[in-house]
Image: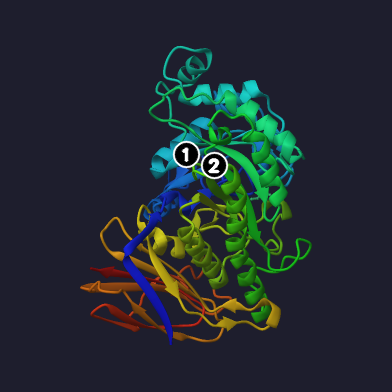
């Protein structure tokens, strides 16, 4: 029996909906086919955006979408993606499969998508190969409501009113594909580029994000902050957020392992690597705390998720992979970690939305399926905009390798916007169910319901069997007074909602 203690009176912080954010890059079949099929497609669409995908994402309450990359962002010249489509420049997508990018999905199309989804926009600028002027003009084009060369150009292209840019990233992975810079150099470049990201509407300031570290590269975070916070006149390093990228790769980058064909050893390797996210957040936060004592700067985990070998027979540059119950666990564990760190983590974006890496949706022409990861996001949506509650769970170590044991359980608890208490739990054990006894101090439970995502380790959805893994009603628990007794199966992600 494992005890879960919840103190509903102790609220620990606000859970930004953006902790459940997403990322879409011009990569493989994410944008083209996955999201955008064009106005003339036989696949049902509204202004070119797939109806089935938009509907599924709205149901999941997608809170924010990052675009156009990734590595693609630092090679993207936004002016190539505006104006009449037949006149738009074609380019080579050098990072991702060397395919021709016809720029038919550009700024107007992204903003249309965001509008249809009803989510916030996160635009990633090009610092690696773009100029300060180019970045500055993009912001003017998108957000200025007046007479100016860029606002006039937007109007000529058919959009009178400005759009809202909620988040803007100044470069992507500038330590690597975004220019191979050193931290001090990037820190200084960041100061310069961000100067010209004007807030044309002071009522809707743009949240500026500096490029942060690759996983455990703590020197990067420290080096960038050192430069950015020098003589910044109280402007907390001229940034609202700094990013962190961390992917769960079961083995090595050279042989990452299959998405569906794996054993118990790989199961635990994957989950153990996923849990490293907590240490990364703690250590990058400790660095930020040195420079930003007032906690003004958010940690933005704008790329995370599993990265496996591509599905056999698919283009290696398209990063297409399947998604199993193991991915559901990875999603549940990470989302619990982000909730627990909501004082510093202000946004997180799983990579990537459709057909790429740990996608929530896969498509095959006109067909679409929801992955196990989708169902976890759909269960966790009840945490969005909630208040994190103080909670603690007892755990035992599980695994096959003494050195890489993992706790059998993770959890997070919130008081939702709907006034209910939402508990999300993950059982990492590949083999064993467990009993959990939850107590809510003096808070009395008046009603409850629960749903679960579970299955065999390798269970996944296919276009022929799209419902193999889905969220099912869960009844193997009792609720009485201020307590719950839960029998949680192995390999599962659970959500319990309590009326209080
Ligand atoms: O998500 C795929 C790639 O991973 C992104 O383009 C890049 O930022 C990261 O290395």
Closer to the camera in the image, 137 or 342: 342
- The residue beneath circle 2 is 241
In screen coordinates, is 339 left or right of 196? Answer: left
At which x and y percent is residue 117?
Answer: 41, 44
Give the position of the C terminus as an image quadrant: bottom left
At which x and y percent is residue 416?
Answer: 31, 59
Whether the residues at callouts 2 and 1 have beta carbons within 8 Å, the answer is no
At which x and y percent is residue 364?
Answer: 55, 56
Q: Residue at x 54, y 77 (%)?
A: 428
Residue with the most extreme left position: 446
Q: Residue at x 37, y 69 (%)?
A: 423
At which x and y percent is residue 75?
Answer: 69, 34
Q: Quadrant of residue 203?
A: top left
- The residue beneath circle 1 is 121
Q: Residue at x 68, y 79 (%)?
A: 265
Question: Which is more foreground, mark 2 or mark 1?
Answer: 2
Tell me how far mark 2 sits from mark 1, CA to CA: 15 Å
Give the position of the N terminus as an image quadrant: bottom left
């Amino acid at each position: 029996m494992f005890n879960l203690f919840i103190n509903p009176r102790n609220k620990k912080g606000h859970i930004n909906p953006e902790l459940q954010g997403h990322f879409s890059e011009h990569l493989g079949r994410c944008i083209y086919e996955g999201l955008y099929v064009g106005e003339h497609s036989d696949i049902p669409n509204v202004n070119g955006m797939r109806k089935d995908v938009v509907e599924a994402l709205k149901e999941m309450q997608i809170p924010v979408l990052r675009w156009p990359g990734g590595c693609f962002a630092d090679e993207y010249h936004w002016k190539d993606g505006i104006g009449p489509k037949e006149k738009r420049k074609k380019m080579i997508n050098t990072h991702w499969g060397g395919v021709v990018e016809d720029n038919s999905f550009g700024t107007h199309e992204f903003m249309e998508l965001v509008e249809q989804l009803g989510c916030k926009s996160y635009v990633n600028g090009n610092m690696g190969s773009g100029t300060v002027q180019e970045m500055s003009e993009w912001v003017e084009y998108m957000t200025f409501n007046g007479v100016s060369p860029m606002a006039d150009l937007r109007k000529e292209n058919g959009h009178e009113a400005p759009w809202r840019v909620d988040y803007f990233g100044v470069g992507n992975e500038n330590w690597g594909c975004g220019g191979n810079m050193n931290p001090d150099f990037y820190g200084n470049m960041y100061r310069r580029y961000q100067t010209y990201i004007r807030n044309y509407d002071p009522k809707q300031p743009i949240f500026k994000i500096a490029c942060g570290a690759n996983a455990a590269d703590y020197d990067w975070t420290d080096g960038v902050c050192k430069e950015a916070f020098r003589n910044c006149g109280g402007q907390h390093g001229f940034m609202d957020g700094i990013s962190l990228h961390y992917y769960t790769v079961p083995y090595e980058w050279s042989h990452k392992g299959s998405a569906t064909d794996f054993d118990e050893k790989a199961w635990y390797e994957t989950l153990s690597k996923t849990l490293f996210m907590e240490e990364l957040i703690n250590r990058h936060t400790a660095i930020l705390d040195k420079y930003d004592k007032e906690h003004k700067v958010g940690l933005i985990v704008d790329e995370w998720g599993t990265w496996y070998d591509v599905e056999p027979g698919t283009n290696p540059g398209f990063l297409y992979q399947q998604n199993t119950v193991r991915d559901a666990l990875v999603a549940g564990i990470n989302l619990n970690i982000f909730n627990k760190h909501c004082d510093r983590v202000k946004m997180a974006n799983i990579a990537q939305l459709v057909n790429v890496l740990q996608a929530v949706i896969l498509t095959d022409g006109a067909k679409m399926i929801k992955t196990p990861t989708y169902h976890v996001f759909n269960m966790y949506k009840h945490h969005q905009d909630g208040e994190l509650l103080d909670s603690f769970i007892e755990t035992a170590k599980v695994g096959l390798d003494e050195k890489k044991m993992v706790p059998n359980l993770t959890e997070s608890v919130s008081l939702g916007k709907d006034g209910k208490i939402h508990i999300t739990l993950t059982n990492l054990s590949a083999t064993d169910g467990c009993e959990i006894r939850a107590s809510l101090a003096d808070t009395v439970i008046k009603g409850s319901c629960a749903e679960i995502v579970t299955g065999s380790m390798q269970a996944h959805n296919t276009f022929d069997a799209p419902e193999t893994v889905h969220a099912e009603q869960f009844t193997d628990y009792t609720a009485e007074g201020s307590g719950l007794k839960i029998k949680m199966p192995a390999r599962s992600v659970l959500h319990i909602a309590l009326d209080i």
